[in-house]
Image (tube, rainbow, N blue to C red):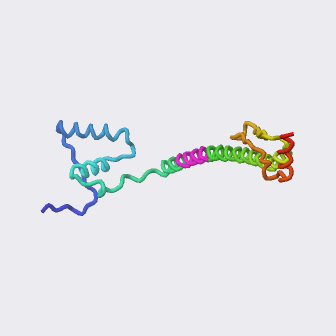
Amino acid sequence: MFQWSKKVVKSVTFNPEVADESLLSLVESHLEPQPDKTFSDLCKEALWQFLCVPEAVKPASKPIAAESVEQKIDELQRQVADLEERFFAKESNRLEAMERHIVQLTQQMAHLAILVTERPQIIHHQPPTSPAPAPVVSTVPTMEMVNTTYAATPSEDVDPVISRLSQFLDDF
């Protein structure tokens, strides 16, 4: 079995061969745009990949700089504030629409209450002597849904003596 030394630092030697020099040049070109990454990091990533170690076992990458975390937090706070603003604006519009509908319904209820209280007066003011009573039509403004027709029913209100006398008057 191969014995590793307990030394933490390991070294990699690049020989003056064409293959090693081209590999070293690739390493330098790969690390150049990433100043926070080291050769040691690159070697560890390569070993993890080469040895087919699952992602769950791999250690987390370098800790993110505090400034980067603060920037992400600020961005998330801006997004949450924007979302809250849009939500409350939408809910405010819904609330205003509901209030308008409630006012409209209250006005319609008040108008219907007035019509209901006036209805008995319309029925009692009909002349009882007419042989075929005409129906009384209540026209309701366009806000209401239905026109209501009320017919005067004098059969309950007519005195039996008057009904007998009306027969004689018709014959006369």
Residue at the limit of the structure toward the front, as seen here: 172
User: For the N terminus, which image quadrant?
Assistant: bottom left
- Locate residue 155, reporting x and y percent: 78, 50
Instruction: Please state which of residues 57 and 95 is positioned toward the viewer in this rendering.
Output: 95
Instruction: Please state which of residues 99 and 57 is positioned toward the viewer in this rendering.
Output: 99
Q: How many labels does the image show?
A: 0
Residue at the limit of the structure toward the left, as seen here: 1
- Locate residue 104, reporting x and y percent: 73, 44
Question: At 30% across and 57% down in the image, what residue appears?
Answer: 56
Q: To which quarter of the image does residue 144 belong? A: top right
The range drawn in magenta is 75-87
Whether residue 145 appears in magenta in the rendering, the answer is no
Q: To which quarter of the image does residue 131 belong? A: top right
Residue 92 visible in rendering = yes
- Locate residue 122, reporting x and y percent: 83, 45
Whether residue 81 appears in magenta in the rendering, the answer is yes
User: Could you tell whether 12 is left or right of 105 in the image?
Assistant: left
Instruction: Please state which of residues 57 and 140 is positioned toward the viewer in this rendering.
Output: 140
**Is residue 30 shown above or below 121?**
above
Question: At 83% across and 45% down in the image, what residue appears?
Answer: 167
Instruction: Please state which of residues 68 and 169 is positioned toward the viewer in this rendering.
Output: 169
- Locate residue 91, reporting x and y percent: 63, 47
Magenta part, dominant SS = helix
Question: At 60% across and 44% down in the image, what residue appears?
Answer: 86
Question: At 86% across and 47% down in the image, what residue appears?
Answer: 165
User: For the C terminus, which image quadrant?
Assistant: top right
**Is residue 148 shown above or below 69?**
above
Residue 128 visible in rendering = no
User: Could you tell whether 93 is left or right of 22 in the image?
Assistant: right
User: Could you tell whether 146 is left or right of 120 in the image?
Assistant: left
